[in-house]
Amino acid sequence: MSYVLECPNCGPREVTDFGFGGEYVERPTERPSFRELNRYVYFRRNAAGVQREWWVHRSGCGEWFLAERDTRDNAVQWTALPADAPAPGAAAEPDVELAR
Ligand SMILES: [Zn+2]
């Protein structure tokens, strides 16, 4: 399925211009326990709904940026450079069923 993503530098482009960098995961701020580090490195929510993701404009400017996309229909809510992105949880809460 093809859709359009908007690079913060270059504007709207076909998704085939971009590389998927995976689901955004909040990095531990302090020295993590083994369990927290394991969760940060290996576990993802894999949401059926809106999730925050890393993307790179590999056929364009090469910039890494964040996007929120609904994984059910690929509707992109927003894209932004990390410094300009809304704080996690500030945007609409994801409408998801967590995979267990
Ligand atoms: Zn770009």
Image (cartoon, rainbow, N blue to C red):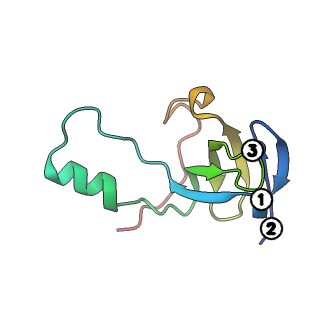
Q: Quadrant of residue 8?
A: top right
Where is residue 80, by image quadrant? top right
Spatial distance from mark 2 to mark 1, Cα to Cα? 11 Å
At which x and y percent is residue 2? Answer: 80, 67
Q: Disc 3 residue type?
A: Cys
For this rendering, which residue is in front, 54 or 69?
54
- Rendering coords of residue 14 (x, y %): 83, 59
**Residue 17 image label:** 1
Residue at figure coordinates x 32%, y 62% from the top left: 42
Residue type pointed to by label 1 = Asp
Q: Earlier in the sequence, mark 2 or mark 1?
A: 2
Tell whether circle 1 marks a residue whose Cβ is less than 8 angstroms from ligand 1: yes
Q: Which SS class for mark 3?
A: loop
Q: Quadrant of ligand 1?
A: top right
**Which mark identifies residue 61?**
3
**Residue ID at (78%, 50%):** 60
**Viewer-side label of 2, 3:** 3
- Where is the N terminus found, in terms of image quarters? bottom right
68 horizontally vs 41: left or right: right
Badge 3 local density, few (<14 within 10 Å), some, or many (20+)? few
As drawn, is 56 to the left or to the right of 16?
left
The residue to which callout 2 is attached is 2
Query: Mark 3 and mark 1: span between their CA atoms?
Result: 10 Å
Nearer to us: label 2 or label 1:
1
Q: In front: 69, or 29?
A: 29
Residue type at mark 2: give it: Ser
Does the closest atom of ligand 1 sit within 8 Å of the Cβ of label 3? yes
